[in-house]
Amino acid sequence: MGEARIDSYRDLRVWQEAMGIASECYVLTKAFPKDEVYGMTAQIRRAAVSVAANIAEGHGRENTGSFLQFLRISQGSLKELETHLLLAEQVHITAPSSAEGILNRCESLGKMLRRLIRSLQDKVAGGFKEGSKP
């Protein structure tokens, strides 16, 4: 069985999962106190959207080196998101049970991103033409 064809960033499982996490974050933060709308709510939403947006932007650059750079930025945004969620738990803005599912998805996505990065690095190291489309 061959690999699935990737015509768009929307075909990437990492982007699809990042979008799912972002959607869950929007739902979670709807329940946050109104005085957090410019604080924790905005930070969580911004970081969650950044994960998916950087995957899409990197893929759109049509250069493996640029794609790798944006995937790493996406990893950083994912860690930022996890930190905001953990802090929201610690300061009792949300219950740990409310954020647990998202944090588990973040861990899984982090692993997916690392595998994709390693795969692309291996292709580059193995003679994959640097300027070609990922």
Image: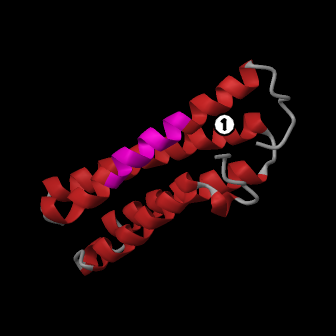
Residue 84 appearing in the image = no
* Residue at which label 1 appears: 68
Q: Is residue 134 left or right of residue 19?
A: right
Quadrant of image for the C terminus? top right
| Closer-to-camera residue (13/65) | 13
Picture coordinates of residue 25, whole percent (x, y): 36, 67
The prevailing secondary structure element of the residues shown in magenta is helix
Residue at screen point 64% across, 46% down = 1
Q: Residue at x 60, y 59 (%)?
A: 53
Residue 33 is drawn in which quadrant? bottom left
Q: How is the image coloured?
A: secondary structure
Q: Residues within 10 Å of mark 1 (few under 14, many from 20)?
A: many
Any magenta on residue 16? no
- x and y percentages locating residue 65 in the rendered image: 74, 33
The range drawn in magenta is: 105-115
| Residue 55: image location, x then y, percent | 62, 52
- Residue 7, compared with residue 1, is above or below; it is below
Q: Front-most of 87 and 98?
A: 98
From this viewpoint, which residue is outermost toward the front? 1
The residue positioned 34% from the left and 74% from the top of the image is 37
111 within the magenta span: yes
Q: Is residue 6 left or right of residue 13?
A: right
The answer to whether 70 appears left or right of 101 in the picture is: right
The answer to which of 75 and 84 lies nearer the viewer is 75
Secondary element type, mark 1: helix
Q: Amino acid at mark 1?
A: Leu
